[in-house]
Image (cartoon, helix red, strand yellow):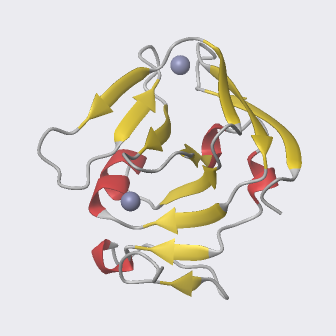
Amino acid sequence: MSNDQVEWTGGCFCGALRYRVTTEPQLKAQCHCRACTHISGGGVNTFMLIPPGGFAWEVGEPARFQHPESQRAVERFFCATCGTHILTQRGGLEGVVLKVGTLDAPEVFGGPSIAIFCEEGQAWHNVPEGVAAFERSPPG
Ligand SMILES: [Zn+2]
Ligand SMILES: [Zn+2]
């Protein structure tokens, strides 16, 4: 299933950054960790993992940020004009972690299959019924 072709587009809120996704995501999830809660504005971070080669920037050059003090710091790619955070990349992981709200048609996401880092979540965070919840990363 991971080689299925898709044709999804998206971008930041102001339109300075545009991207294209051409490969079915490997993973659909929501993350409750403190960093995701902080950056999302208070909610969970809803994302999908796009395999290597399945994501390409089409318009604009994203700004980048990596927290200097966080142990599991990822590199964050965002729009320098409007601030929309579009994706993260982690050392050792070749794919990109794409925030589904930046898709032109977020409904293609269809919902997460797992919830991760629930032990850091807030009381108002919800895990949809039928979605497997993990205290931290899923085993394996
Ligand atoms: Zn923008
Ligand atoms: Zn997180």
Give percent across and percent down for residue 105.
79, 42
Residue 80 located left or right of residue 13:
left
Residue 117 located left or right of residue 102:
left
Q: 24 and 44: which one is in front? A: 24
Give percent across and percent down for residue 94.
52, 45
Residue 4 located left or right of residue 113:
right
- The number of callouts visible is 0
Q: Height in image: 137 above or below 70? A: below
Q: Height in image: 134 above or below 72? A: below
**Which quarter of the figure has residue 35?**
bottom left
In the image, what residue occupies the spot 71% across and 55% down? 25
Q: Height in image: 62 above or below 140? A: above
In the image, what residue occupies the spot 59% across and 13% down? 16
Q: Residue furthest left?
A: 69
In the image, what residue occupies the spot 39% across and 47% down? 90
Give percent across and percent down for residue 67.
21, 39
Q: 12 and 92: which one is in front? A: 92
